[in-house]
Amino acid sequence: MGAGIDFHAGDLELQCGQTLFDARLHYVTYGKLNESGDNAVLFPTYYTGTHSSNEAYFGPGRAIDTDKYFVVVPNMFGNGLSSSPSNCPDPQSAAGFPVVSIYDNVECQHRLLTAELGVKRIRLAAGWSMAAIQVYHFAALYPDMVDSLLPFCGSARCSPHNDVFLQGVAAALKADSGYCAGRYTTPPVGGLKAFARVYCGWAYSQAFFRDHLYRDLGFTDVESLLQDWEQDHLHWDANDLLAKIATWRSADIGSHSRFASFEAAMKAITARTIVMPCRTDLYFPPADSAIEVELMNNAELRVIESDWGHCCASPGRNPETMRMLEDVFSELLG
């Protein structure tokens, strides 16, 4: 697989009016760009994802065949690999990190693809969760560059209900006295564990717990699943988690100065689009996706029928959804 590289973007003027100094976008490529520069697949990272976790979606001989396509995976700002609270020097370290929007990520990704890598066209822009939000924005901002679009279990903006969830998990983390307003010297373990427990309850559906589907993941009971989520989140820096929540909360495809409204931004997307929400997703329900598809010119809604909630499309987690995605990747690249 590919090796990680830092794209040095210089001082990045942000949508919020601040500047991210010496911005670094960490990325990995898989496969080779052809001479015409038109065999690229863009697959950004999701909330607690990195390029490594995205590798479950593609590979040699797969629908997204890295022997045929040039797959580019940019790591989202705030994920600990690209510029983040945990790796920036003062004054932008820790709680001093500015709010980086989805559009800030996407504009930097565009510079990476065009100026650094020589990509001229994107055959497919795809992503799960926060990555879906990013590819929506990319296709609106650069419509002439994207042939096909697959946002799955995601949306083009953060809904009011989604924002309430995000405020809740952030509050659970900040309530730990050890968080110290983001200036902690040791990780706020209690806050990270509370964050994970609240998050887990939203990541799966009610039916997932009622029908004991966590057993398919190797957990004997709910408590063992929750403890696994706790341990996973202890690996993350608290300020990095909160920085990405700030990015998520600010997400709105209509917020760029180029667009007069949300509706105008959605209509700007020309790529052939298949939008795939999960029927039981508590973050990004199909009703929200239906509104978005109705505003687009070349889009189709395909609902994933699964009781796994938002996590139905987590990379490699649910074989049935992975097979479904594989088929749609093939269709859009066909």
Image (cartoon, grey):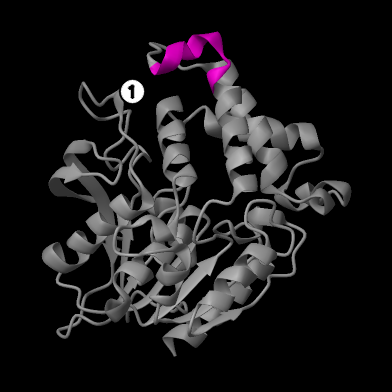
Q: Which residue is mark 1?
A: 94
Q: Position of residue 166 (x, y in %)?
A: 57, 38
Quarter occupied by the C terminus: bottom left
Query: In the figure, is residue 222 to the left or right of 87?
Result: right
Q: Amino acid at mark 1?
A: Ala
Q: Residue at x 37, y 70 (%)?
A: 140
Query: In the figure, is residue 65 to the left or right of 195?
Result: left
Quarter occupied by the N terminus: bottom left
Q: Residues within 10 Å of mark 1 (few under 14, many from 20)?
A: many
Query: What is the span of residues highlighted in magenta in the rendered image?
Result: 174-182
Magenta highlight on residue 181: yes
Magenta highlight on residue 90: no
Q: Can I make out residue 192 in this image?
A: no
Q: What type of secondary structure mainly makes up the magenta span?
A: helix
Q: Position of residue 215 (x, y in %)?
A: 79, 48
**Residue 293: quadrant of the picture:** bottom right
247 up-or-down from 331: above or below: above
250 up-or-down from 80: above or below: below
287 up-or-down from 302: above or below: above
Q: Position of residue 286 (x, y in %)?
A: 68, 66
In this rendered view, identify the residue nearer to me: 142 or 28. Answer: 142
Q: Residue at x 72, y 40 (%)?
A: 201
Q: Position of residue 161 (x, y in %)?
A: 65, 46
Q: Can I make out residue 129 in this image?
A: yes
90 up-or-down from 157: above or below: above
In this rendered view, identify the residue nearer to me: 212 or 259. Answer: 259
The extreme front residue here reads: 260
Mark 1: secondary structure:
helix
The extreme right residue here reads: 210
